[in-house]
Image (tube, grey):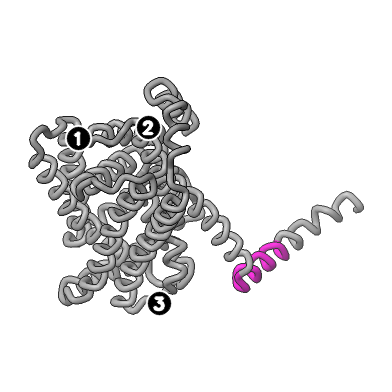
Amino acid sequence: MLIGLIAFALYLYFFVGFTELSYVLENLNPMDYAFFYSLAVAGTLLSVLFIAASWHSLLSSLSIKAKLRSLFLYTWAGTFVDLIVPCQAVCGEVTRIYLVRKDNRESYGAIAASSITNRIISYVISSVGLLTGIVLLLSRAAADPFLLNLLIIALIGTVIYLVVLFYIAFDQKAPKKLATVVFKLLKALKMKRFSPEELSRKAEDALSVFHQGFETFRKSPKHIIKPMIFQLLSLLLNIAVYMLVFYSIGIKDLYIDFFIIAYFIVGTVQIAAAVFSVGTLEIILTNLFVLYGVPLGLSGLAATLLRFLTFWLPVLVGYVTVQVIGARSLLNPKAREGLAAQQNIEEKSAEPQKKEPEA
């Protein structure tokens, strides 16, 4: 991360020039910047709320009680894990499922079914958006081959990921195969506190509920209408955030295809590289903006402002959220009782060891 930031700083110094950046900053309209960038920050927060609302709707369809406020926090926590740990769309999803399960003690299977369905809806909408971006880029007189290839690779990757998700959702044997792999991994790691028989029984119960959850969505497609609307609103808000960032620095004459392409390029590189995208993505964005006629100094500034919203803000909010969730779990009465009971056991087991020397 630090190396990426240094690389971007060097890029700005040698290719943009701090003098140029200083001139750009001095000529910004402070009122416009404060107004539009504040709206961009609000739009970013609201887009995450829509993602959480989509999941909340799916959980409600499966009669799983969860507070929207909690899901909002868990969505940030999952995003934080996705951005810090290079296993995008897997580690974050597992984190979210675990946190909901920890809250309501419902079956992992049902929670996973709602979570994966939410992810499927998101990726279907993203696939349509990527295809739209490719068509818009091809409609230009001179489409940049690098950008075109990047979007095509992103579309292929998204489709492959969707195929895997649909395979898990529709093939009853797929989750069982995944569970078998997990059992073998636990056995290889010699994690003795996990009983194979107990794990097998719990896995079978979870898988049964897992497929029942998907069966609910397959038999009643109306359950995914509201989540689709929420996900679409989140996507439109995210694209609007890109527009607001450019409005904040005084650029208001770019076409919608520019913002769609920029949005999906950021998503593509960020998903693929996670924390390693720092520096690289800023440079790619700066060059993309220049390609569309944005002055070099403004391009560097726009890239920095966008990356704050798409990377640094989620990392910051996610980190704070993780700390809040941890503190909240300690304040939970049941958690406190469990800790107290554990401490009593440890104290009792330690008493004989203290008395032995006296004897």
Q: Is residue 185 magenta?
A: no
Q: Name which residue type carries label 3.
A: Lys
Amino acid under disc 2: Gly
Please state which of the two labelled residues, at mark 2 or mark 3, is closer to the viewer: 2
Q: Earlier in the sequence, mark 1 or mark 3?
A: 3
* Residue 34 percent coordinates (x, y): 46, 53
Mark 1–mark 3 Cα distance, whole angstroms, equals 43 Å
Q: Amino acid at mark 1?
A: Leu
| In magenta stretch: residue 341 | yes
| Residue at 33% in and 66% down | 109
Between the residue at mark 2 and the residue at mark 3, the CA separation in whole angstroms equals 50 Å
Q: Is residue 103 left or right of residue 122?
A: right
What numbered label is drawn on residue 297? 2
Quarter occupied by residue 167: bottom left
Measuring 30% from the left and 76% from the top, which residue is drawn there? 62
- Asked if residue 335 lies left or right of residue 26, the reply is right
- Which one is closest to the eye, mark 1 or mark 2? 2
What is the number of the mark on residue 65?
Answer: 3
Q: Secondary structure at mark 3?
A: loop
User: What is the magenta range?
Assistant: 332-345
Q: Residue furthest bottom?
A: 63
